[in-house]
Image (cartoon, rainbow, N blue to C red):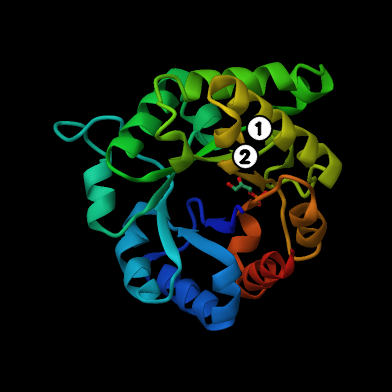
């Protein structure tokens, strides 16, 4: 049985103090019983990881970063290593987000190196895949997602695949208010499971968590999270609103 995961990607928002405030507000609005049913993950900026880690101590909520270096350490100005992320309490790291793919030119090969580094240091990668609007309109999205998965997961052994969380985030649905329909999302989640079965085995395909991301909010979360094979959500805008985010957590906890 896969436990649902609701993850907030705060992106490049909130100062140090505002991050602490948001974390505390979210904690105050989430009920303990919901956390038994649903895992919750907060991903603030690097600068605010420490203060958010302090705020979530003993709550059962987890901490994640939004990026990672594929190197261990050294003369790499501005980069953050897996070891540094672990030292500040991170358990997860978002890798391959479409904003990093498009604005920072991260290739599948770079993303693969980052996923491997995260796994080496026992950080769970939240590996993002998804097609652009043109790729969807041209109906080549399955091929794009298969390539992202195959190249992103290259060299990751079957013993480690259960540590990886996949996030299907269609680029056209991110921050646009346009979300994939539950049917569209369920179709891609099932396709992703088929690829995992092909690359690994049936057990891996059944066990891997696959989140949906792209304009998830408190109004559409029930229909999206109830769709077949959707194990949770990676949320941008609505994760900055404590009422909305905690409502989504409650919704996820109530889904059988
Ligand atoms: P929005 O929820 O703002 O569309 O962002 C989705 C996302 O990119 C999460 O990683």
Of residues 123 and 101, which is closer to you in this image?
A: 123
What residue would you read off at disc 2?
206
Query: In what quadrant of the picture does the N terminus appear?
Result: bottom right
CB at mark 2 closer than 8 A to ligand 1? no
Report which quarter residue 237 is drawn in.
Answer: bottom right
Q: Residue at x 72, y 29 (%)?
A: 191
What residue would you read off at disc 1?
193
Labels 2 and 1: the sequence-earlier one: 1
Of residues 177 and 199, which is closer to you in this image?
A: 199
- How many marks on residues? 2
Q: Residue at x 57, y 22 (%)?
A: 148
What is the secondary structure assignment of the residue under circle 2?
helix
Report which quarter residue 180 is drawn in.
Answer: top right
Percent across and percent down for residue 83 are 22, 45
Residue 107 is at least partly visible in this image: no
Q: Are marks 2 and 1 in contact (CB under 8 Å)?
A: yes
Q: Residue at x 59, y 17 (%)?
A: 147
109 sits left or right of 47 in the view: right
Question: Which residue, as the protein is rendered here, is positioned at the far left?
Answer: 74
What is the secondary structure assignment of the residue under circle 1?
helix
Q: Residue at x 44, y 29 (%)?
A: 158
The residue mark sitting in front, 2 or 1, is 2
């Amino acid at each position: 049985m896969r436990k649902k995961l609701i993850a907030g990607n705060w992106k490049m928002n909130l100062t140090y103090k505002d991050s602490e405030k948001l974390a505390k507000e979210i904690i105050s609005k989430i009920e303990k019983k919901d956390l038994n049913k649903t895992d919750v993950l907060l991903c603030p900026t690097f600068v605010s990881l420490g203060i958010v880690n302090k705020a979530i101590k003993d709550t059962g909520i987890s901490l994640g970063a939004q990026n990672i270096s594929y190197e261990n350490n050294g003369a790499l100005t501005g980069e953050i290593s897996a070891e540094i992320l672990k030292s500040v309490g991170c358990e997860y790291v978002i890798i391959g987000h479409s904003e990093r793919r498009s604005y920072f030119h991260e290739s599948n090969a770079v993303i693969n190196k980052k996923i491997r580094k995260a796994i080496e240091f026992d950080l769970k990668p939240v590996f993002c895949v998804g097609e652009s609007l043109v790729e969807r309109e041209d109906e080549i999205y399955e091929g794009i997602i298969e390539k992202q998965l195959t190249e992103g997961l290259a060299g990751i052994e079957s013993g480690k695949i259960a540590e990886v969380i996949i996030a299907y985030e269609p680029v056209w649905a991110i921050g646009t208010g346009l979300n994939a329909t539950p049917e569209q999302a369920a179709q891609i989640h099932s396709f992703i499971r088929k690829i995992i079965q092909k690359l690994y085995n049936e057990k891996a395909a059944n066990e891997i968590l696959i989140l949906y991301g792209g304009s998830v909010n408190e109004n559409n979360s029930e229909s999206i999270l109830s769709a077949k094979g959707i194990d949770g959500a990676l949320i941008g805008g609505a994760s900055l609103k404590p009422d909305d985010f905690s409502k989504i957590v409650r919704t996820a906890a109530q889904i059988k």
